[in-house]
Image: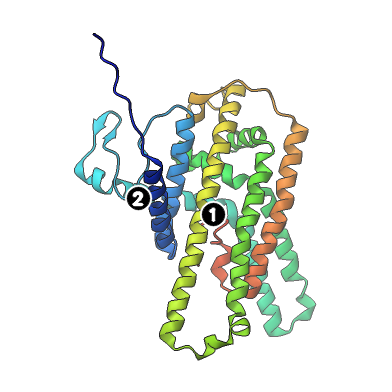
Amino acid sequence: MTALPRPAYGPGRLARLGRVLANGAIGSLLCMGPVTAVIALGWLVRRSGHHARSRFATVEEMPGWLSGPREWQGRPTSRITRALGGLGANIRVGLMALAALLVWTLPFTALWLGAWWAGWENSFNKGYEQAVVGPTVFLLGVLVATLVVPALPLMVAHLAAEDRLSAAFELRRLRSAVAQAGWRVPALALLAVVFALPFAAARGLITTATDWAPQLETLPPDQIARIQGWITLGLAAAAFLSAWITRTLAARVYARAAARAAGLKPGLWDGAEAAEGAMPATPPSRTLAVLWYAAAMVLTLAFAFLILAGQFLDHAWWRWVFHPGLTLPWAG
């Protein structure tokens, strides 16, 4: 008598919910500081890469915060790798993703920093004849940002799927994936605008706190420090959860777009992970692709305005470069 195969049971709903809550708590705590936020970024990028590769029919273990895989290329891993391999991978991928994001974003964040410095210099020196320099440099940075920012989610997803820094600069592959993504490119841009709203609002609320809550001025220093800690934790949770949602959705968009692009241009995608899941596709309309990207560029204008509004209220220079919606999911 032939024995029936034993059914494989996955984790139940409560177990999955508990895992999501635990991951959210760990990620939020890590995003309270810039150094540990790199670990959170690495975990998010590894998760998105795992999701994309699973769509390409690649079977592998789910990335963890601390422990590493039990097997690698068919061989059992060492005890150290099993115990701390996940942490090491998160640090490595986090630094790799941050480096790629900085290279992509510095062309306009550096201009914003220059405009910010020019504005303060003009304000202190009363050099009104140079008043136009700061706004002009900032608008130039906004123009560059509108060209770059819409492609960032798919760039990070491609880097995550390939697990190498050079993938972030494979412009021909990225262009073909963006063309296949279509309306999903402005949808991701709209999501970035929505997630940037809480950070701009928080800067305003923090800056004007003594106006709408004058009792704060009478609180002892230890209570003020406690309140500041809760605010930092809240911003860290918002940064981590928004990045988690964005990276997950971007990975889904990339998996579909890259598979169709690989089916359309197999030579271009030869050797890439997406080639394993290539599917037949028709060439996208260039006009529609340009229009969808133009819509994402318009939405990026709103995103840049929210960054400017937050910086106008709170003048920390590093937020021009390390805004949670651009590079590092840090409460900052």
Place of residue 186 in the rendered image (x, y in percent of width and height, measured from the top left): 68, 45
Residue at which label 1 appears: 242
The image quarter containing residue 75 is top left
Side of 3 where 229 appears, left or right: right
Q: Residue at x 48, y 88 (%)?
A: 219
Sooner in the amino-acid sequence: mark 1 or mark 2: 2
Give the crowd class for mark 1: few <14, some 14-19, many >=20 residues within 10 Å: many
Residue at which label 2 appears: 65
Amino acid type, callout 2? Trp
Amino acid type, callout 1? Ser
Q: Image height check: is 84 above or below 319? A: above
The foreground one among 206 and 120 is 206
Side of 53 where 115 appears, left or right: right
- SS for callout 1: helix
Give the crowd class for mark 2: few <14, some 14-19, many >=20 residues within 10 Å: some
Side of 30 where 197 appears, left or right: right
Place of residue 84 in the rendered image (x, y in percent of width and height, measured from the top left): 27, 49
Whether pointer 1 and pointer 2 mark residues with C-beta atoms closer than 8 Å, the reply is no
